[in-house]
Amino acid sequence: MNPAPSLYSNMYHVYLLRSKKDKSFYIGYTGDLDKRLKEHNTGLVNYTSKFKPWSLVYYEGYISLLDAQRREKALKSFGKSYANLKLRIKESLNTKEGAG
């Protein structure tokens, strides 16, 4: 028997990870946040494999894949969207888990 679907199973997530190794950040989007975090932490994502382990610092949920892709692109431009996000979650970034 399959487990009940998650409330968030039909959503896309834009997420911010922080490397516990070198404190760097990684921004991405996915349809399965738990699976994607495991992929980052087991070295299945080539770009992030050398900086593992990673901790999830922040995520946003979207019903629309296109909205999630646009948000990820805006954050990865490291302009105002990224700066505003870091200001909004500055205490989370300074916690033990967020700080690595």
Image (cartoon, helix red, strand yellow):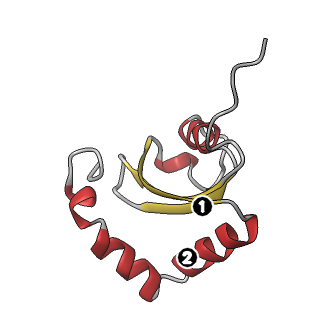
**Residue closer to the observer: 5 or 89:** 5
Quadrant assignment, res 77: bottom right
Packing grade of label 2 (10 A; few <14, some 14-19, many >=20) is some
From the viewer's perspective, is residue 26 above or below residue 88?
above
Q: Position of residue 54 (x, y in %)?
A: 44, 45
The residue sitting at 77% across, 18% down in the picture is 2
For the residues labelled 1 and 2, the Cα–Cα distance comes to 9 Å
From the viewer's perspective, is residue 30 above or below residue 87?
above
Residue at image mark 1: 28
Indicate the secondary structure of the residue bearing disc 2.
helix
Q: Position of residue 75 (x, y in %)?
A: 52, 76
Q: Position of residue 52 (x, y in %)?
A: 47, 43
Residue 76 badge:
2
Indicate the secondary structure of the residue bearing disc 1.
strand
Ranked by sequence position, the earlier of labels 1 and 2 is: 1
Quadrant assignment, res 85: bottom left
**Residue closer to the observer: 93 or 62:** 62
The residue sitting at 34% across, 56% down in the picture is 23
Packing grade of label 1 (10 A; few <14, some 14-19, many >=20) is some
Residue type, label 1? Gly
